[in-house]
Image: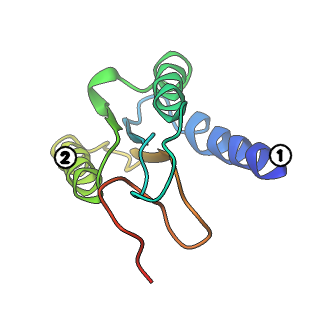
Amino acid sequence: MRVAVSLVLAFSAVVFCRPVHAARYALIAANNRGWASEVPLQFAHDDGTRLATVLKEIGGFKGHNLLILRDATPQSIEAGLKRLSARMHANPDPGGQDLLFFYYSGHADEKALHPGDLTPQN
């Protein structure tokens, strides 16, 4: 519970303390599927959708700068980050205050995220 509260506070400080004019970009990876050995989750997709709503309604994120990936692979996450990075570089904030927010909801352990289409690495 303390971790969740800390994350919410950190998120609030980063997102809501940015200047109003700063562009905000987000990649949300919502993965019900993890590694083949893991039981699929039920609510990761919902988590991602709800967070996207909060980012748009309260956080000042524009829909076209928000990318939601469901059951993403490492390759699709990397491609999404590159896509958002290209947008940021094409339209930089004059004050250098742009924000890129990454959120992952899915299987993980203390060493790594477990996006779909991967087998565990030792």
Mark 2 and mark 1: Cα distance apart in space: 34 Å
- Whether 66 is drawn above or below 54: the answer is below
Q: Nearer the viewer, mark 2 or mark 1?
A: 1
Instruction: Write the residue at 44% across / 48% down.
Output: 102
| Contact? badges 2 and 1 (CB < 8 Å) | no
Question: How far across and down, in percent of the image, does residue 91 sit?
Answer: 20, 40
Q: Give the class, few, some or many, for how many residues have Cα within 10 Å of label 2's Cα (few <14, many ≥20).
A: some
Amino acid type at mark 2: Arg
Marks 2 and 1, the one that precedes in the sequence: 1
Question: How far across and down, in percent of the image, does residue 106 sit?
Answer: 51, 47
* Picture quadrant where residue 110 is located: bottom right
Q: Give the farthest residue toward the right.
A: 2
Instruction: Write the residue at 38% across / 46% down.
Output: 95
Q: Secondary structure at mark 2?
A: helix
Amino acid type at mark 1: Met
Relative side of 51 to 98, left or right: right
Question: How far across and down, in percent of the image, does residue 50 sit?
Answer: 53, 22
Q: Secondary structure at mark 1?
A: loop
Residue bearing mark 1 = 1
Nearer to the camera, 113 or 11 = 113
- Whether 89 is drawn above or below 60: the answer is below
Relative side of 77 to 102, left or right: left
Nearer to the camera, 54 or 17 = 54
Residue bearing mark 2 = 83
Relative side of 113 to 117, left or right: right
Nearer to the camera, 9 or 109 = 109
